[in-house]
Amino acid sequence: MTGADGLSSAVLIPAYNEATGVARVVKTACEADLGPVLVVDDGSSDRTAAQAEAAGARVLRLERNLGKGGAVAAGVRELTAEVIVLLDADLLGLTPEHLRALAAPVIKGEVDMTRGVFTGGRWSTTAAQKMLPQLNGQRAILREKLVRLPELSSSRYGIEVVITDAARQGEWKVKDVPMEGVTQVTKEEKRGFFKGVGLRLRMYSDIVRTLLGGRRDS
């Protein structure tokens, strides 16, 4: 979408085995009217792609799992909008108003990036946001900033660390946007306790590896 008073925008949702929740997020994104909605199916083995398409998204299917960073990088290459709104596929409580508020400062040219901050949702996700808001995956970013991050493709779950570090080093203009009542389905809820814990540990490993890599390069 190209607004009369701002830049064009699109919504990008990376998703891996998110068939149970992706349609909910896609429908909300479509209702927000922020331009095309692209779901990158990151090598899923379930019906993620079919559910996303049925809800109104265009789907880019990856043959193998590249991780969240790789999926986002692939999606950015597909899109031409000047502003990319990044959303996780497992959100609860999301409304079109949340998305418009997240995107507006970037679309209007006021900042280079916005970052969503969950408030008033479930205790676990709200507390995590207060401790590590830089890891929130809900953002609106100028596309030109994302395409200049070659490490994005290999970052996997470290993607938010890569973006946050680039914003700091590049002195981007950044604004935090409260997302009242928004939360996420935990990995343990989606995959079962033991598999969920394994996935969570893998996520933390990607984040730590990205952090350490950034320190070596700095």
Image (tube, rainbow, N blue to C red):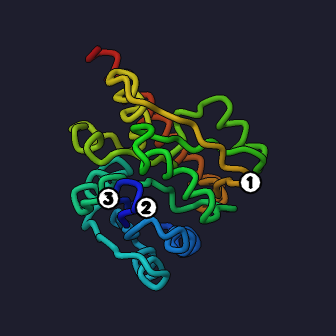
Amino acid on which disc 1 is placed: Gly
The image quadrant where one finds the N terminus is bottom left
Most extreme residue toward the bottom, as rendered?
54
Residue matched to label 2: 13
Percent from the top left, x then y, of residue 141? 39, 45
Q: Residue at x 49, y 52 (%)?
A: 103
SS category of the residue bearing label 3: loop
- Determine whether, in the image, residue 136 is placed left or right of residue 215: right
Q: Residue at x 43, y 46 (%)?
A: 106
Question: Dot 2: few (<14), some (14–19), or many (≥20) neighbours within 10 Å?
Answer: many
Q: Residue at x 64, y 64 (%)?
A: 95
Percent from the top left, x then y, of residue 17? 46, 67
Residue matched to label 3: 65
Q: Nearer the viewer, residue 153 or 138?
A: 138
Label 2 or label 3, whichever comes before in sequence order: 2
SS category of the residue bearing label 1: loop
Q: Nearer the viewer, residue 86 or 32?
A: 32
Is residue 158 in view from this perspective?
no
- The tag on residue 181 is 1
